[in-house]
Structure formats: structure tokens, C-alpha cells
Image (cartoon, rainbow, N blue to C red):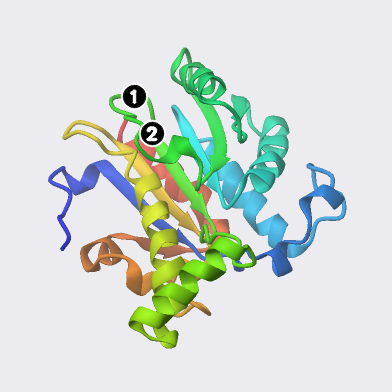
Amino acid sequence: MTYDLPFPPENRASYLVDARPFTARNRGNPAEMEPLGENWNPTRDEYAQALRALARSPGNVMIAMPNYREAKWAGAYLQEAVDKDVLVDESSTNEETDRTKQSFFAGEGKVLVTSTRGTLTEGVDYDGAKLSTCAVVGVPLVNIGSPRIRGVQRAYGDTFGENNAFEYALTVPAVRRARQAIGRVIRGADEVGVRAFVGRRYTPDGRHSVHGFLPEGEREEFTRMTPDFLAPQLESFWRNHG
């Protein structure tokens, strides 16, 4: 069961950014790369271009990476690439997370880089001007090698069939997480914002695509483009909204 947003569609821009899948194999180990492009591969070049364009949007911008290690990489890059304060969330205590959140809300527009599986992408009310843009990078699948996740997948396989086990246990929760994150942007009829899924797996014809797990109305609203076209599209949207 799905429910359409009851707010004016012209107040939101929704993008599917068609970049190479942000998988561990494609992107490489961020710990072995300098944050400003030393030893980068083409995958990181593509994502750096998209993240730079999104982070330069007016107001508060949240970049949700697949995990905290990638959030650290993205934060280090954006701290040098944009003229905004960049806050990098990490796995920490509730008190520290709350301090990060309050710093994000205070003063001029900032960039918050976090993990899509962290606590700042769900259950936080980013009403009013607290968030103008949210981008989810990659599909936030959990570590399939952990004993607990293998047990969960086995339980789904026993109940719904082996062919459905990975989809039910891992893919559906990951897409739900991603949708929860971008759902932080538009919280009222007068709010304006940008929502972006970054990565080819969100496109309808991508390998291991998750496009079909998005509600039909949502799929129709998202515009597909490559990272090269993202910056001018964002500039046009914000120019039309003051």
C-alpha cells in the first residue's frame, strides 16, 4: 500500500543519477586513496562530480553513503570541494549524534555526510528549512557475510523460498532505508527540496536494478541523468524557486 505526497510536485526535484554502481569492487578501498583524487578510479570520479554538485545546492544538504567508511571519504573530499561547513557523522553515542544534528540545524547552510543505515536518516524531523537536499549514494545493503544476516536470509528462504530470500531479507529493507532518507526533505506543503538516488542500480535497466522496488508513482516522478547534467539541472531548479 502506497500513498502519494499531498504536496505540490513543482516544489520538488527528483533525480536518478546514472553513475557506475557504487559497489566495493567498482569503487575500491577508500583508505588507499587520497580524498582529493590521488589514485582514484573512474567510479570515484563520477561520484565525486555528483556529490560536489549536490553539496553546492542552497541550504542544508544531507549526503547518505552506504556506510560510515564511505561517509568519511565523501566528507574529506567535500570539505575541500565546497564553500560550506561539512559535518561528517560516524558511529557514536546518541549524545554525540544529537550534537552533530544540532550543529547541522544551526546557522547557515551546511553539508551533513552520514551513513544511510545511521540514525540521522530516519526518525528525525527535518521540517522547514532544516533540509533542502538529500542524496542517497548506492544501495545500502548490509554485510551479507555476517552470521546474523546469513541466519536472517536462511529464515526467509525457509519460509518464502530460496529464490526470494535475498530480495526479502536484504534488498527490500535496503530500498526502504533509502526511501526513508530522501523522505526527510519534503515535510510540508510549502517546503521545497531536491531528492536524488545516485547509482545505476536505481535505474530501470541497471544490473541488479532496485527500480522496481520503488512505488509506481515515485518511479514516474524521478528524472534520469548522468552526473554531467546534474549541476545545471540543480541550478535551474533552485533559480526557479528563488
Q: Do labels 1 and 2 touch, CB within 8 Å? A: yes
Which label number is shown at residue 132?
A: 2
Q: Is residue 55 left or right of residue 70?
A: left
Residue on which disc 1 sits:
129
Q: Is residue 171 above or below residue 165?
A: above
User: Which quadrant would residue 221 be assigned to in this image?
Assistant: bottom left
Which label number is shown at residue 172?
A: none
| Amino acid type of the residue that numbered disc 1 sits on in the rendered structure | Ala
Q: In front here: 101 or 165?
A: 165
Count residues near mark 2 (Cα–Cα under 10 Å), then give few for <14, some for 14-19, many for 20+.
Answer: many
Q: Residue at x 58, y 51 (%)?
A: 50
Quarter of the image with the N terminus in it: bottom left
Q: In front here: 114 or 84?
A: 114
Q: Is residue 25 above or below residue 74?
A: below
Q: Residue at x 17, y 49 (%)?
A: 5
Could you say where residue 184 lies in the image, as x and y percent from the top left? 34, 39
Could you say where residue 47 lies in the image, as x and y percent from the top left? 63, 54
Q: Is residue 35 left or right of residue 190?
A: right
Could you say where residue 180 lies in the image, as x and y percent from the top left? 35, 48
Could you say where residue 90 lies in the image, as x and y percent from the top left? 62, 34
Q: Is residue 69 above or below residue 86?
A: below
Quarter of the image with the C terminus in it: top left
Count residues near mark 1 (Cα–Cα under 10 Å), then give few for <14, some for 14-19, many for 20+.
Answer: some
As measured in the structure, the alpha-carbon distance from the residue carrying label 1 to the one carrying label 2 is 7 Å
Q: Residue at x 16, y 44 (%)?
A: 8
Q: Is residue 156 left or right of residue 96?
A: left
| Amino acid type of the residue that numbered disc 2 sits on in the rendered structure | Ser
Mark 2 secondary-structure assignment: loop
Q: Is residue 183 above or below residue 222?
A: above
